[in-house]
Amino acid sequence: MKKFESVAANENNPKWENMIKREKALYNDQSDLRTSFERDFTRILHSDAYKRLKHKSQVFFSPENDHICTRIEHVNYVESVSYTIANHLGLNTELTRAISIGHDIGHSPFGHQGERILSKISQQYLNTPFWHEKNGLYIADNIELLKDREGNKQNLNLCYATRDGIISHCGEIDENSIKPREEFINLKEYNYPNQYKPYTWEGCVVKISDKISYIGRDIEDAVALGIIDSDLKELKNTFGAELTNSSIMNILVEDICNNSSIENGLLFSESALKLMNNIKRFNYENIYNSKRMKSSNRFFELVINEIFDTLKDAFDGEKTINNLQKIKKWYPKFISKYEKWLAQYWNMNREPEQKNIPVFDINNAQDYYKSIIIFISGMTDKYAMDVYNEIIRF
């Protein structure tokens, strides 16, 4: 019995019209075989932000090791876990797929450390924190561009339910029993992670799947890299089974499917919740806060701050473009790439087919600083390091 079928995201749901709302009208094509959420999935799949996830760290910066989890692999895990849960419960798997594939498109290079570094910069220059869930929504709404059937560049224009799932997915939560909110809010009013519950049950599923998907895999990677010992005695004594990513996910997925209900929400049993929290605590103590991580974290801070400062120092109101031209002789690849990117959103010298795309006013200091932060957030680990090397090279 699919016990959540009556609250699934479909035409029978009283929230349906809100769920499928888009910021702008979609092109009309009656022959299109895809549903609204399938279209969202495909749009994200074709976006540059999604493609770059394969070269962004999940937790460990290890570009030479093909078997260490990258951000795109994590996204695929979340898609798989959320599909299994949603399918078992009778929810809309097309929506969970769309949210899952898009939930981390706002992530910075160098994982959560990169996010913390950008947040410090954002606090200093914009008086607001940077967090990848909100950045993901901003990128989907304003930055990512795909050509429509007339050849005009348009933003992704995702459904409300997909956009809501992206900004509401924060997996760093410890509470049990998650239910969706009833309020149809302006998603631009989010001020901090986990401020609101997701609007749909499907969004709640992705939120939980995010945590299920990373806690076990991070252990496997830490063992492979020698950060923690392979015997894992502390955890095996409480786990009661062979400690692998697949076994952890299997136990937690089965548990939440068996214990959840519309009345009580998405719910773990006490034993499963304790297990998950024990694993998470172990990861923080032995992996995320380990001494082995500190050296790379200091390097990431140096890289991101140097990139930001190089572009920041070029700002001088209407003279900014001229200043960028001056430093291009020193950093030709980097500045050319930034100028080309910025030209798509700037308020001057823009191509006709981009006339409806939101823009930065780079004569305004805060707009200009924001453009730098967004630009850096889209970088892959390797590209950020390449830029840094170009900056310091004589």
Image (tube, rainbow, N blue to C red):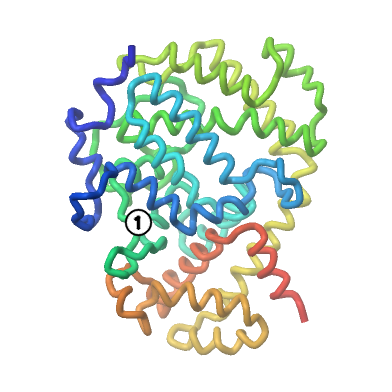
The picture places residue 337, in percent across and down from the top left corner, at 55, 75
Q: Position of residue 165 (x, y in %)?
A: 38, 40
Return the residue at label 1. Answer: 156
Q: Position of residue 62 (x, y in %)?
A: 73, 48
| Residue 236 visible in this rendered orientation of the protein | yes
Image-based side of 81 in relation to 276, left or right: left
Q: Residue at x 43, y 45 (%)?
A: 192
Q: Depth check: 298 or 107 in front?
A: 107
Camera sees residue 116: no
Tell me: 12 left or right of 53: left
Q: Residue at x 51, y 35 (%)?
A: 78
Q: Quadrant of the N terminus?
A: top left
Instruction: Check disc 1 and give the amino acid type.
Output: Leu
Is residue 345 rendered to the left or right of residue 320? left
Image quarter for residue 24?
Answer: bottom left
Image quarter in which the C terminus is found: bottom right
Asked which secondary structure carries label 1, the reply is: loop
Location of residue 144 in the rendering, given as x and y in whole percent from the top left corner: 41, 61
